[in-house]
Amino acid sequence: MTTLGTASAAPGEMDTGRLRVGETRDGSPAKLPVAVVNGAASGKTLYVQAASDGDELNGVGVVQRVVPQLDPAEIAGQVLVVGIVNYHGFQVAEHRNPIDDTKMNRAYPGDESGTSSERIAAATFDAATRADLILDLHQGSTSRMIDEVRVRCGKRHRAHADCLELAKAFGAGYVLDQKGPDGQLARAAPDEGIPTIDPELGGSVGWDERSIRVGVDGVFNVLRHYGFLDGTADVEPQVRASGFDQFGSPVGGLVRYERDLGDRVSAGDTLFYVTDTFGTRKAEVQADSSGIFWRSRRLPQVATGEYVCSVATDVDEY
């Protein structure tokens, strides 16, 4: 019997339930939606979570589409799912946990006696570290962003090669291989010896169906690559980047891009220009080095010095 919160499933069964993580301001219980898929055959355990940042909804869209397709009779091993991590932020469509103004993905491994975010992190970290592999589904908040997978443990970490393999198996096409901030699940779980990745499924406000499909395909690629499901994952070389050049606007006005997401750029290529309200060009900005046009702001209006776009650098394939 495998349990997660109130969800409990014998081999060959599936169940959903709730994982209690404290109480809301009116004293009612705060419970995260969870699912357990216990395969008919033995195998590894995969942990999947979404919406640790409360307004990053594409991961919830992935969970919503993946879980109904999982047939325990066809699975070897177990899949544990926490569909919404940042319970309080999700309710009000905010990035941070409004109870303690904390970004949940900076609170791991958590503290079961700590703040609201630390308690949620502790409860989900306890579930995650029961697994052999971890997928922490994110997106680029409200920016326009390439679909990427982030490996956050750092290149010298003992789990780095295994995290890279997991990223390649997910198969989003692009990988950011750069050590992340303290408190990220993708930083904390590899310290426990568990390969972990942070898929950033595009960027949107609300659902982005294209990026959700990338995430759904990625989860099933992982399930096949690691033997949870029969079949062979179509694992292709991934484009890997190790850093970013970030660009702000030298003037205020309206941005027009000269490059699309995923475009290769060379040093000196124009990335964007800025016009006034009537279309008169005020400034243009060029790339400092070669790379890939990776991320950009969604809204066209900018003030002087405001962020506009990023170019991924130190790019290769693996």
Image (cartoon, helix red, strand yellow):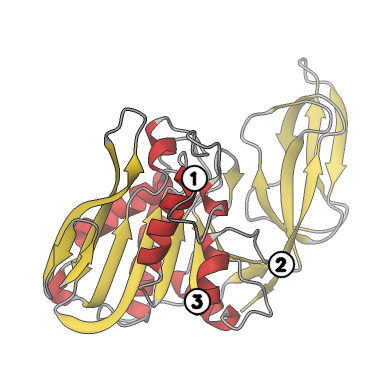
What kind of element bears circle 2? loop
Count how many numbered circles sit on residues in the image. Answer: 3
Instruction: Name the N-terminal-most of marks 3 and 2.
Output: 3
- Where residue 122 appears, x then y in whole percent? 43, 58
**Residue 258 appears in view:** no
**Which amino acid does the dot numbered 3 rest on?**
Glu
> Which mark is in front, 3 or 2?
3
Q: Give the distance between the C-alpha atoms of the residues marked 2 and 1, in whole angstroms.
A: 33 Å
**Disc 3: which residue:** 192
Q: Residue at x 57, y 53 (%)?
A: 106
Task: Confirm or deny contact between disc 2 and disc 1 (CB under 8 A).
Answer: no
Towards the viewer: 159 or 120 = 120
Q: Quadrant of residue 27?
A: top left
**Which amino acid does the dot numbered 2 rest on?**
Ser
Q: Residues within 10 Å of mark 3 (few under 14, many from 20)?
A: few
Towards the viewer: 8 or 271 = 8
Q: Give the distance between the C-alpha atoms of the residues marked 3 and 2, in whole angstroms.
A: 24 Å
Instruction: Name the N-terminal-most of marks 2 and 1.
Output: 1
**Residue 226 appears in view:** yes
**Which amino acid does the dot numbered 1 rest on?**
Thr
Quadrant of the snapshot with the N terminus: bottom left
Q: Residue at x 42, y 44 (%)?
A: 86
Above/below status of 199 relative to 237: above
- Where residue 257 appears, x then y in whole percent? 71, 39
Q: Residues within 10 Å of mark 2 (few under 14, many from 20)?
A: some
**Disc 1: which residue:** 115
Q: Residue at x 72, y 44 (%)?
A: 309
Q: Residues within 10 Å of mark 1 (few under 14, many from 20)?
A: some
Q: Give the distance between the C-alpha atoms of the residues marked 3 and 1, in whole angstroms.
A: 23 Å
